[in-house]
Image (cartoon, rainbow, N blue to C red):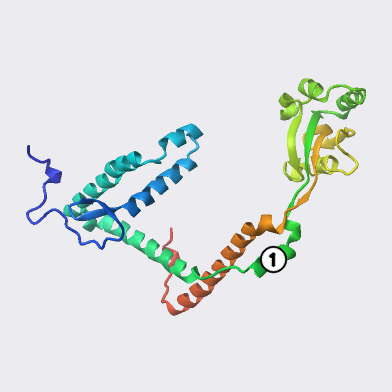
Amino acid sequence: CEKPGFLKPGKEAKVTTLPVAVKGMVIAKVNNLPVTLEELNMYVDMYNASLDLRQDLTVEQKTEAKIDNREKKIDYLKSRLIRQAVFYQAAVDRGLDRKEEIAEILQRNKTDLLAGAMQNEIVKNIDVSSAEIEDAYKANKDLFKEPEVRKIQEIVTRTEEEARPILIELLQGGDFATIAKNRSIAESAKNGGDLGFIKRGQRGEQFLNFDDVAFSPALQQGAISSVFKGSEGYYIIKVEGMKESKEISLSEAWDTIKTLLLVKKQSEELDKVYSQLSREAKIEIHEGEVK
């Protein structure tokens, strides 16, 4: 059976035999191109991690699709890594790596890879001390608080005249949710006016007046507000539940603070090194050519 034309090597072409320095346990070879156990495990971990990010799969589907046993690993080795190695060697034999557009992509990838490696080299020894974390926590204690949240129900009417008899009805024992469903013009009416737990500022700047009433110290759990004007009409609200502001402890905030400080120190170091390197480099930018 004759090979298709695009698989026929040129006169001097031959099966690729690339010298490769092997690091790890070799579990397969394609010609002399090895595949190691470490390489397989790396690709398996990447594949499994990608499944966790999928929003179109249920938890059960993700669990079923994950490579989590020896048989699945062997299947992935054959269907993915061996297949990739075969096509890779065929591409090199055909000289595809020397095609101009592919060579350009390979060079860009090399540039990105080495630039990233250089930056990693610069920041690899940067660390954050316990004292720095503690000082940052003490200096920014106001940032490490869980804000007060309140469970709010609302009724919104077009006019104050419509709202006042509703308020009287509520104060006489009328059911807030039922009245909201039947007479509120807000989107929340379908849920009986329930907004769930919200924090101050969550609904945006147009609801500043709403927040002033909803989070007023005078309005405690179970209380109903008077009629007030808001962004969408005239409001009556009820506080269904409250969770007070809570301070986040140093131990709870430790990892977050460490990460933020580490990123800041790394960024500052990279900026410093870049400033030095760019002064030594010959940089030309032709802004006029940018269309």
Q: Does residue 16 appear left or right of residue 135 in this picture?
A: left
Give how far across and how far down residue 110 sits, in percent: 34, 62
The picture quadrant where one finds residue 189 is top right
Q: At x 38% / y 51%, what residue is drawn? A: 42
Q: On the image, numbered disc 1 is attached to which residue? A: 134
Residue at screen point 44% across, 65% down: 288
Between residues 252 and 141, which one lies in front from this camera angle?
252
Q: Nearer the viewer, residue 215 or 22?
A: 22
In the rendered image, the vertical position of residue 243 relative to residue 58, given as above or below: below
Q: Position of residue 166 (x, y in %)?
A: 87, 24
Q: Residue at x 72, y 54 (%)?
A: 248
Q: Residue at x 80, y 45 (%)?
A: 244
Q: Three-letter amino acid code at disc 1?
A: Glu
Q: How busy is the neighbourhood of tag 1: few (under 14 within 10 Å), some, or many (20 plus)?
A: some
Whole-percent x, y for residue 91 in the image: 21, 51
Q: Quadrant of the C terminus?
A: bottom left
**Number of marks in picture:** 1
Q: Is residue 74 above or below residue 60?
A: below
